[in-house]
Amino acid sequence: MSVLEKRLEISVNVAILCAFLMVAALAGQRFWLARSADRLSGPEIGAKVSLAGVDWTKSGRTLVLALSTTCHFCSESAEFYERLVPEATNHGVPIVAVLPQPTAEGRSYLDGLGLHVQDVIQTPLTAVDVVGTPTLLVIDRTGKISKAWVGKLAPKQEGQVLASLQ
């Protein structure tokens, strides 16, 4: 075997090894990202939620809007929330807005969106099992999450939220 053939064989082997390592790294990254997305997919149905000053037993269900003043998806969802708030009120479902920002800042943000929510609470979003905004939760009278929607909702999901108020 000539020196040229030997170098060519080594080069091909190195190229195959590099290609294998790249495929393995990409597969591992996709697997890891998929697992992370599963963990961050949203609140767990049935999880108990406790918020200072909120008595879940006053109503059969309570709608929680977990928002942030820095969330552009929250602002983009304002049109839906403008329909949602009166619908919830008409069905006797209390609404609690939860934001990580100070209450006055949160209330000002909501007013700027045209949303007039009576209860605005400042708390870390993790206190209501939320990892991303916007998140809508329906909490039952025992304080457990019965329904949850995360992110800017598609029309079908908006319909599901409205139906949950019936």
Image: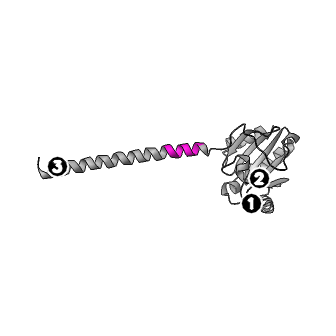
* Magenta highlight range: 31-38
Distance between the Cα atoms at labels 3 and 1? 66 Å
| Residue drawn at 67 percent across, 57 percent down | 71
Q: Secondary structure at mark 1?
A: loop
Q: Mark 1 is on which residue type? A: Gln
Residue 99, image x, y percentages: 75, 55
> For mark 2, what is the residue?
98
> For mark 3, what is the residue?
6
**Dot placed on the residue nearer the N-terminal end, 3 or 1:** 3
| Residue drawn at 35 percent across, 45 percent down | 20
Distance between the Cα atoms at labels 2 and 3? 68 Å
| Residue drawn at 79 percent across, 40 percent down | 143
Residue 101, numbered circle = 1
- Asked if residue 41 can be seen in this view, the reply is yes
Relative placement, left or right, of 153 versus 95 is left
Relative placement, left or right, of 51 versus 129 is right
Residue 30, image x, y percentages: 48, 45
**Dot placed on the residue nearer the N-terminal end, 2 or 3:** 3
